Amino acid sequence: VPELPDVEYFKRYIDATSLHRRIERVEVRDRRVLEGVSPRRLDRTLRGHRFASSRRHGKHLGLRVGADGWLVLHFGMTGEPKAFEGAADEPPSTQVLVRFAGDRFLAYVSQRKLGRVRLVDDFTLFVEERRLGPDALALDLPAFRRLLAGRRGSIKSLLMNQKALAGIGNVYADEILFQARLHPKSCVGRVRGERATRLHRAMRRVLGTAAERKADPARMPRSWLLPRRDEDGSCPRCGHELATVKSGGRTSRLCPACQQQA
Ligand SMILES: [Zn+2]
């Protein structure tokens, strides 16, 4: 499931492959991924323009279309962008295809049609209207402390609540809590002082490092939980057997020895 590091990597990938190219047309293969825009209007709005710049907020990626608005991509459960040359190389499960001059393409690919493609006037306004919290990678320590203050519930729920903090899903929430040595069910109210500092530092480190490593589990450091969360593994720090805790339909992986409940 694409989380902040995946979408940050997608942003860098699109920046490197697809900015500043003249758009010849846009073909929609499955209109169910479109939200609030018809295939015809999408094509008419983008045609003849170029993607001038990109912005990411949490799991949303915005591509600026000339002066006329933003194409906003959300990748759902399985989505990803694919840039390629030559129409014959179109990937399977392409939902929306942007054709550039020079026989170059950018495909929005999604096996399950849970992603969303939108056209909005203003990316900042879009983020505000959806009431998304601040981007998890952009948040400094004082702002993070303010976010924690006065909140209830478990720390993991807070990290994953997109209206509080945008970008983190189940896998990276587990990794951040593992590195901060905090149990996912710890009460937010008890994450204060040094614990809050440790959590913030782990959040920045995990999200930044994962984005640099293309959000690829095989490239993550051996000291991380992520490469071994899907196996019957042991803790890379202390060797204790990893535990699985289910709550609210989510499966948390953690080390019961290293991660104390606060
Ligand atoms: Zn451990």
Image: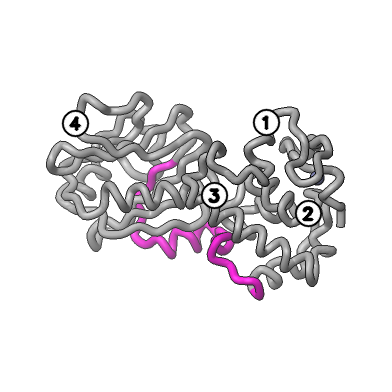
160 or 219, nearer to the observer: 219
Q: Amino acid at mark 3?
A: Ala
Q: CA distance from mark 1 to mark 3?
A: 17 Å
Q: CA distance from mark 1 to mark 2?
A: 19 Å
Q: Is residue 211 above or below residue 121?
A: above
Q: Residue at label 1?
A: 230
**72 within the magenta span:** no
Mark 4: secondary structure: loop
Q: Residue at label 2?
A: 181
Q: Amino acid at mark 4?
A: Gly
Mark 2, residues whose alpha carbon is within 10 Å: few (<14), some, or many (≥20)? many
Q: CA distance from mark 2 to mark 3?
A: 18 Å
Q: Amino acid at mark 2?
A: Arg
Mark 1, residues whose alpha carbon is within 10 Å: few (<14), some, or many (≥20)? few
Quadrant of the frame with the N terminus? top right
Q: Looking at the image, which residue is at 35% across and 57% down?
A: 54
Q: CA distance from mark 1 to mark 4?
A: 37 Å
Q: Quadrant of residue 80?
A: top left
Q: Earlier in the sequence, mark 2 or mark 4?
A: 4
Q: Is residue 43 above or below residue 187?
A: above
First to last magenta residue range: 116-142
Q: Give the number of marks.
A: 4
Q: Position of residue 244 (x, y in %)?
A: 79, 35
Q: Earlier in the sequence, mark 4 or mark 3?
A: 4
Which label sits in the foreground, 2 or 4? 2
Q: CA distance from mark 2 to mark 4?
A: 49 Å
Mark 3: secondary structure: helix
Q: Residue at label 4?
A: 86
Q: Earlier in the sequence, mark 2 or mark 3?
A: 2
CB atoms of marks 1 and 3 within 8 Å: no
Q: Is residue 98 left or right of residue 138?
A: left
